[in-house]
């Protein structure tokens, strides 16, 4: 199923992406968790586990395409010594939702930057680490190249990164059922229970176009980052972890 708006617009246009997430921001946390049967929480933990950050004291990292900050509890639980996380997201309402759910013990450790990751002017070599959870599918191949360049520019020499994204697990025996759920069942549930909305139905559209994330792997290699790609659940998600040489 293709989102009706996507038929008339470029689904990778930053304005289109920001609009989709603005509309679904208030429902994002609950809906994404229930739609993935809670598996998304395990995937976020796996992303943080893959982050090879040997020394976290006083570190400043970036959460790219941060959404509502679902990865922050996992990060700060594993690395309590982190001093600051700069959260970057293109959706203003995603930032509003993220701020609203912060409690006092965490608020002073999160800085928010509403910006297009592909154009952010964060200083060169300013991040001790970087994470990204489920934002890469909203980029096309050319944007993956731009993302990789930005990631390499922002990271300090030797700094690690860990990225995770839902994918289209081609070759997986359960792929037909997976695609039926994303392309048929999930949009139907959304239309019935969310007043005809079709924003989360874009997950199916984006994952099908994203494939197995080959363009992400190639882009990270091409900018000189050391990276290992690892599939989860038959390739339904992929983790890219590594570091900036130096």
Image (cartoon, rainbow, N blue to C red):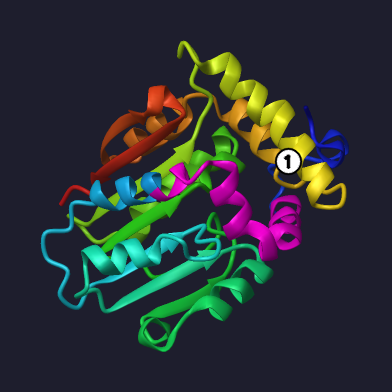
Note whether residue 126 is visible.
no
The structure residue drawn at horizontal position 53% and vertical position 73%, both measured from the top left corner, is 113
Question: Which quarter of the picture shows residue 188?
Answer: top right
Disc count in the image?
Answer: 1
Q: Which residues, given as a range, are shown in magenta?
A: 15-41
Note whether residue 205 is visible.
yes
Q: x%, y% of residue 132?
A: 42, 52
The prevailing secondary structure element of the residues shown in magenta is helix
The structure residue drawn at horizontal position 42% and vertical position 45%, both measured from the top left corner, is 148
Few, some or many residues within 10 Å of mark 1 (<14, 14–19, 20+)? many
Asked whether 33 falls inside the magenta stretch, the response is yes
Asked whether 225 falls inside the magenta stretch, the response is no
Q: x%, y% of residue 158?
A: 17, 55
Tell me the quadrant of the picture where the N terminus can be found: top right
Q: Is 183 on the left or on the right of 41, as rendered?
A: right
Q: x%, y% of residue 198?
A: 80, 44
Question: Which quarter of the picture shows residue 29?
Answer: bottom right
Decide: is 2 above or below 46: above
Decide: is 133 above or below 80: above
Question: Which quarter of the picture shows residue 128?
Answer: bottom left
The structure residue drawn at horizontal position 17% and vertical position 69%, both measured from the top left corner, is 56
- Residue lying at the far left in this picture: please name it: 54
Q: Which residue is mark 1?
A: 11
The structure residue drawn at horizontal position 24% and vertical position 50%, both measured from the top left corner, is 49
Decide: is 115 above or below 182: below
Secondary structure of the residue carrying numbered label 1? loop
Q: Is 152 on the left or on the right of 237, as rendered?
A: left
Q: Is 68 on the left or on the right of 245, as rendered?
A: right
Q: x%, y% of residue 89?
A: 56, 63
């Amino acid at each position: 199923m293709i989102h009706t708006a996507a038929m008339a617009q470029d689904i990778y246009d930053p304005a289109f992406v920001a609009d989709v997430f603005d509309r679904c921001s208030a429902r994002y946390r609950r809906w994404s968790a229930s739609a993935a049967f809670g598996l998304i929480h395990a995937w976020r933990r796996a992303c943080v586990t893959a982050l090879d950050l040997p020394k976290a004291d006083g570190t400043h990292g970036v959460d790219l395409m941060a959404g509502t900050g679902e990865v922050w509890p996992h990060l700060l639980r594993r690395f309590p010594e982190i001093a600051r996380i700069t959260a970057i997201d293109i959706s203003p309402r995603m930032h509003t939702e993220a701020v609203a759910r912060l409690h006092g013990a965490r608020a002073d450790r999160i800085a928010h930057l509403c910006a297009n990751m592909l154009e952010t002017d964060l200083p060169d070599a300013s991040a001790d680490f970087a994470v990204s959870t489920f934002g890469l599918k909203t980029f096309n191949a050319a944007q993956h190249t731009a993302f990789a360049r930005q990631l390499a520019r922002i990271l300090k020499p030797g700094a690690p990164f860990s990225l995770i994204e839902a994918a289209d697990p081609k070759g997986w025996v359960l792929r037909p059922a997976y695609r039926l759920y994303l392309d048929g069942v999930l949009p139907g549930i959304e239309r019935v229970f969310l007043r005809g909305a079709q924003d989360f139905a874009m997950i199916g559209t984006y994952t099908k176009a994203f494939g197995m994330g080959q363009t992400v792997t190639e882009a990270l290699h091409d900018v000189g980052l050391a990276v290992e790609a690892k599939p989860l659940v038959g390739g339904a998600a992929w983790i890219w972890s590594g570091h900036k040489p130096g």
